[in-house]
Amino acid sequence: MSDLHNRHVYQPNPEFAKNARIKNMDEYHALQNKAIEDYEGFWADAAKEKIDWIEPFTNVMDESNFPFVKWFDGGKLNVSYQCIDRHLKTRGEKTAILFEGDRGDVVKITYNELSRNVNKFANLLKEDFGVKKGDRVVVYMPMIPEAAYAMLACARIGAIHSIVFGGFSSESLKDRIEDAQAKLVITADGAYRKEKPYLLKPVVDAALEGETPVEKVLVVERNNEEVTWVEGRDCSYHELIKDKSDVCAPEVMESEDPLFLLYTSGSTGKPKGVQHNSAGYILWAQMTTEWVFDVKEEDVFWCTADVGWITGHTYIVYGPLAMGATTVMFEGVITYPDAGRPWKMVQDHKINQFYTAPTAIRVLHKMGDHEPSNYDTSSLKVLGTVGEPIDPPAWQWYYNEVGQGKCAIVDTYWQTETGGHVISPLPGATPIKPACATLPLPGIMAEIIDEKGNTPELGEKGLLCITRPWPAMIRGVWGDPERFVKAYFGDVTKNGKPVYFTGDGAVYDKDGYITVTGRTDDVINVSGHRMGTAEVEAAILKHENVAEVAVVGKPHNLKGEGIFAYIVLKEGEVTNEAKEINEIIKKEIGSIALCDDMVFIPGLPKTRSGKIMRRILRSIAKCEAITQDISTLEDPSVVAKIEAIVAK
Ligand code: WT7
């Protein structure tokens, strides 16, 4: 971070800025100052302008029960109405979802078609499965339009969806189903990846073995591969949808009625069900899509995430559809058949905004330095990145090769818990610096402070916090209010009052720009996906010959961070353990949690009170010299032994 204060500054493209929603820094500051001076007024105006209310709200924010906060009380709305119905008059024949399949098959779904499909789907959920307002529905789907229909159909009838990323294993799926007590699972037989079918249904079958709250499984046929069918439980979407009416009145929802749960890893225990509620979430999803990507009426917007992550929720489905945009949904792998795939898609569909993760940028760069120039990518205006701190070389390649030096890069910092972006450049206003998320968005009171709420010295790392509740803030951890309070509001106070701590470290530069430096807790960021060390450790401990384990993150040139496991065996020489442990991880969590490094050591570095010194393990994994004092360890000699094993 030595050059933190002297990074090159890139001004917004003046042509672009002319027509941008926020055109310059004066406009940015005017908005942010309005929020600072009249916080509730700022949000009330936004909510009145953006949301099609069935009944207006009577109260803007109620924080009397902080951190349990209510927004827009008294208001009634329906999120699917916001995303579909209100556009039908003016945009009925506009493409809502532009789907490109793995094998290059393209389907354009208009807002009219989206409406019919979602209404039918909603009627199916009600009539065939008796799904009611407040019921939890687990969605385990590939990247096909039916995934979006399922989400919006739930929203239409007031059911709470909980999407589980298709890469998670049957055990992970089982845990999430049980925690949410879901009565229905929506899945697909499978989908296509690199032109080959892969299957999802068998994972669902395994997850439902034994006792389960699930009564029915709805199976969307995508690749018509043969899958097991459990009579009386499994139902064919294509059969049931046929005779459904395409009219289903939207359920009238309160502002604070839950919209969805999304499970994410924390530093301890099992993944927690992050709860987002209707009005605040959809408001911010829409506002940030408009501001940060500056999507215009005729634009085509592509976010490469999977709907199984928050990025897919907010920026494939809810944000773009709430504003009436055309959103691209891609089934395949962006490096298949070659590293030109995304640039070919940009050319074919005249994509204007492209949003992906640093890990994808690094892989695309490595595979095809000049690949973008083989295609006509002149439609691009805004390039986005999300999920982990981007490194300057990846940023430079993105800016110069992909953006041809004329596109703004929006390094968007946010989390599952924040619902939408919280720190990001505005493409027509903010002068950007490589690998820097820059400034809080208007309305977001993000600050770098220490545990007591003081601002650190310039250039010193601090804790990234949000000091006032915002509409799209996490509303709770499903079924565990105590964990919600402890996980997010237990570490940092300002003026003696608890504030939301993101779990990330960050630093200000001389211009007040925020650079996010990464997690300060035991969470590893693998390819932009959050993994809790505790979860990976729990999986490894299931191996019968494992006595102890500690997992840390280690810098990885493509993934950002890789998983490094230190394992102490109960007895004997190491034989097949590494392979067996990987099998267990695959079964317990999924391939995304496989270890990049696994070392078998005689003992872990622990303090006399038994606490594992992970900092030492992190240093050893990076092959760094140990600078911390190891004399307090119960057995300091273990450090040299571990170093010798890792060095091998
Ligand atoms: C964590 C949240 C938000 C959607 C994808 C991940 C890291 C996210 C950035 C960024 C530096 C970032 C943080 C955060 N992160 N965006 N632009 N710069 N770090 O969502 O799984 O909830 O993970 O991702 O560490 O806490 P998530």
Image: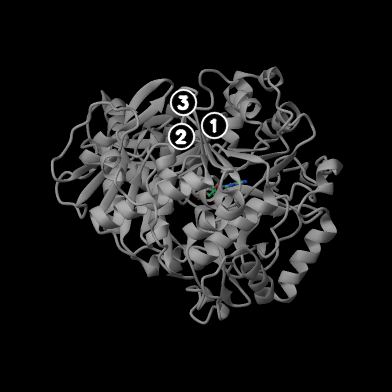
Element type where label 3 sits in the image:
loop
Q: Nearer the viewer, residue 425 or 148?
A: 148
Q: Position of residue 348 (x, y in %)?
A: 62, 26
Residue 511 sits above or below residue 195 on the image: below
Kindly tell me whether mark 1's CB lies below 8 Å from ligand 1: no
Assess whether mark 2 and mark 1 are in contact (beta carbons under 8 angstroms): no
Q: Residue under circle 1?
A: 623
Please state which amino acid type lies under the numbered disc 3.
Answer: Asp
Q: CA distance from mark 3 to mark 2?
A: 50 Å
The answer to whether 531 appears left or right of 387 in the picture is left
Kindly tell me whether mark 3's CB lies below 8 Å from ligand 1: no
Q: Residues within 10 Å of mark 3 (few under 14, many from 20)?
A: many
Q: Residue at x 83, y 56 (%)?
A: 25
Please state which amino acid type lies under the numbered disc 2.
Answer: Ala
Q: Residue under circle 3?
A: 102
Labels 3 and 2: the sequence-earlier one: 3
Element type where label 2 sits in the image:
helix
Q: Residue at x 58, y 62 (%)?
A: 283
Q: CA distance from mark 3 to mark 1?
A: 40 Å
The answer to whether 481 appears left or right of 631 in the picture is left
Q: Nearer the viewer, residue 64 or 143?
A: 143
